């Protein structure tokens, strides 16, 4: 159980996306999703999610009324749950679950929080990104004895995905 913690804009999505590429390149099955910015004319207007099997959906947008609202974004919980929840099924065999991210928008969904807790209580290896900001749900996850929290920084963000892939890939040999 690994949590990659960093401030907004520090590169969490880039790091977990690179980790996904490395693991897939090593033949490791993945489930979960990445969160992507939606930009219009150079301005961020929302967020979408994309699962590792290619499903896509809207997470939040400035043109969505909500509730809930996080900052200037209305969160589309129904669309998020439609795409995200099936992607949280643990992969078979030596697969890994990657979740980008356990943030305010995603955690507004009670079914999502429940599914995440089931994953943390389960057996599948799991990597998720979290913000450094306090949140009751992620603070409780960070306190679990089986959870390791890795701080993503400018100094380690380029090498961290490779180090994590080596640590997580059950198919790599000794040495």
Image: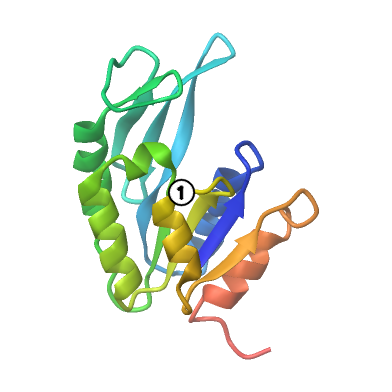
Q: Quadrant of residue 35?
A: top left
Of residues 125 and 136, the one nearer the viewer is: 136
Colour approach in the figure: rainbow
Can the viewer see residue 65 in this picture? yes
Q: Residues within 10 Å of mark 1 (few under 14, many from 20)?
A: some
**Residue lying furthest right:** 155
Dividing the picture into quadrants, the one containing residue 4 is bottom right
Residue situated in front as seen by the camera: 103 or 164: 103
Residue identifier under label 1: 135
Callout 1 secondary element: loop
**Residue 94 versus residue 78 in the image, above or below:** below
At 25% across and 58% down in the image, what residue appears?
Answer: 115
Which residue is depicted at the point 43% across and 58% down? 98
Q: Is residue 141 above or below residue 106?
A: below
> Which quarter of the picture shows residue 114?
bottom left
25 above or below 130?
below
Is residue 31 shown above or below 10?
Answer: below
Q: Residue 118 or 21: which is nearer the viewer? A: 118
Quadrant occupied by the C terminus: bottom right
- Residue that appears at 37% across and 71% down: 95
| Residue 9 x/y as whole percent | 63, 36
Q: Where residue 39 sits in the image (x, y, percent)?
A: 51, 18
Q: Residue at x 41, y 73 (%)?
A: 125
């Amino acid at each position: 159980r690994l949590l990659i913690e960093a401030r907004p804009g520090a590169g969490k999505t880039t790091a977990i996306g690179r980790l996904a590429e490395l693991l897939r390149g090593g033949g490791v099955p993945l489930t979960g999703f990445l969160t992507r910015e939606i930009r219009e004319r150079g301005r961020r207007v929302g967020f979408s999610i994309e699962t590792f099997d290619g499903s896509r959906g809207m997470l939040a947008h400035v043109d969505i009324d909500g509730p809930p609202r996080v900052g200037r974004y209305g969160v589309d919980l129904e669309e998020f749950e439609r795409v995200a929840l099936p992607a949280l099924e643990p992969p078979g065999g030596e697969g890994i679950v990657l979740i980008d991210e356990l943030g305010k928008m995603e955690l507004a969904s009670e079914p999502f929080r429940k599914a995440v807790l089931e994953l943390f209580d389960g057996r599948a290896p799991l990597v998720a990104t979290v913000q450094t900001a306090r949140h009751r749900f992620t603070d409780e996850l960070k306190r679990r004895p089986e959870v390791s929290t890795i701080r993503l920084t400018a100094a380690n963000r380029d090498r961290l995905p490779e180090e994590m892939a080596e640590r997580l890939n059950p198919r790599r040999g000794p040495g």
